[in-house]
Amino acid sequence: MRRLVLPILSVLMLSCGDDSLPKPKGYLRLEYPNAKYEKTQIPLPFSFEKNELADPIKSVKSSGNTNGVDIKYTPLKATIYLTYKEVKNGNIDSLLRDAQNLTQKHAIKADEISHKVYENKEANVYGMLYEIGGDAASQSQFYVTDSINHFLSGSLYFYAKPNYDSIYPASEYLKKDITHIMETIRWKE
């Protein structure tokens, strides 16, 4: 019996030295493929390049002088909604005001709204990109125009309750796509 007690006591004394610590929280690592872009073929007075990760553009919606394209990202559970309006009878001021007001509607839930001016004189494309931080419904909005004939606005929405921390990686990935869309917009004559 003594022979058994001595080894058990020594094991117990040696094992009591270190306190166990809780495991640190694990975070989901989201990785998205490098973007590959292809030119769109749509029956609207503009073209652009979209990410191949996005679903194929199936239809173009239309009502009056407004047309739109939905760029769906099924793997990211998100859509970039593009709305095209023709500039006519000096309505550029109201189109700009409407686009800016739409962004300001998110100010209630947003932690911040920053903007970046976009200008491409060679392609006659001018616009603004708004990045919305916080638990707002839309994380990015933009508009581009030639100020004479064309006006295109866009908004990014996710199919989920807005939780900035959860959608941040996907939002950052799609902001790059939005920037690429803006950079590749070409007006058709």
Image (cartoon, rainbow, N blue to C red):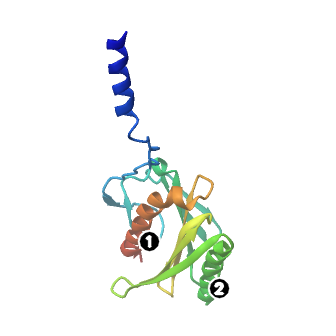
Report the residue at 41% width, 69% height from top: 181
Q: Amino acid at mark 2?
A: Ser
What residue sits 48% from the left and 67% below the top? 44
Q: Nearer the viewer, mark 2 or mark 1?
A: 2
Q: Quadrant of the C terminus?
A: bottom left
Residue lying at 32% horizontally and 60% vertically, measured from the top left: 37
Query: Mark 1: few, some, or many residues within 10 Å (few <14, many ≥20)?
Result: some
Q: Which residue is mark 1?
A: 46
| Horizontal side of residue 93 vs 51, given as left or right | right
Residue 23 position in % (x across, y down) = 44, 44
Determine the residue positioned at 57% across, 82% down. Answer: 87
Secondary structure, mark 1, is strand
* SS at circle 2: helix
The residue tagged 2 is: 94
Task: Assess whether mark 1 and mark 2 are in contact (beta carbons under 8 angstroms).
Answer: no
In the image, farthest residue toward the front? 2
